[in-house]
Amino acid sequence: MTAHLSSAGIADLIVGAELPPLRLPPISRTTLALFAGASGDHNPIHVDIDAAHAAGLDDVFAHGMLSMAYLGRMLTNWVAQERIQTFTARFVAITPVGAEPTCTGRVVRVADGVATVEFAVTLADGTTTVTGEATLI
């Protein structure tokens, strides 16, 4: 079941309702370079393969904040930003170049005019890279 908070109030939400997933194109080196420029995070392990190799990595990988930004996009596609009371994320795995992230969310609590949504970013191979939670009023 998909919930749409834009057309429902908090009291109308059902525990277990799912947010519309956000499926994203493969992470490219161009995406990483553009995000580095926009965010100011110029850590070379995200854009320079030689720096990634020197750090013991096979390749560059996505910024954790890029995944969090995608989650924010999924959430604000579903609910107005001013209704988001809290938004937290935990980075649990690397998102490699070429990975196709999907953001998902599910309502886990509704009480006293506040809804809690748990969310995750997963890759096509089933790896979860980010988990988190948001509270909505």
Image: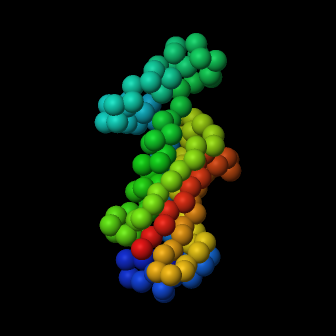
As drawn, the residue found furthest toward the right would be 126
The answer, for residue 121, to whether it is visible in the render is: no
Image height of 38 relative to 119, above or below = above
Residue 96 occupies quadrant: top right
Q: Quick check: 49 above or below 17?
A: above
Q: Residue at x 46, y 41 (%)?
A: 65
Residue 83, can we see it? yes
Between residue 122 and residue 41, name the one nearer to us.
41
Q: How is the image coloured?
A: rainbow
Image spot of residue 27 (x, y percent): 48, 39
- Count the labels in the image: 0
The quadrant of the image that shows the N terminus is bottom right
At x 48% / y 36%, what residue is drawn? Answer: 63
**As rendered, which of 19 and 123 lies closer to the eye?**
19
Q: Residue at x 47, y 57 (%)?
A: 87
Q: Quadrant of the C terminus?
A: bottom left
Percent x, y of residue 128: 64, 49
Residue 36, quarter of picture: top left
The quarter of the picture where residue 53 lies is top right
Q: Position of residue 105 (x, y in %)?
A: 55, 64
Q: Residue furthest bottom?
A: 12
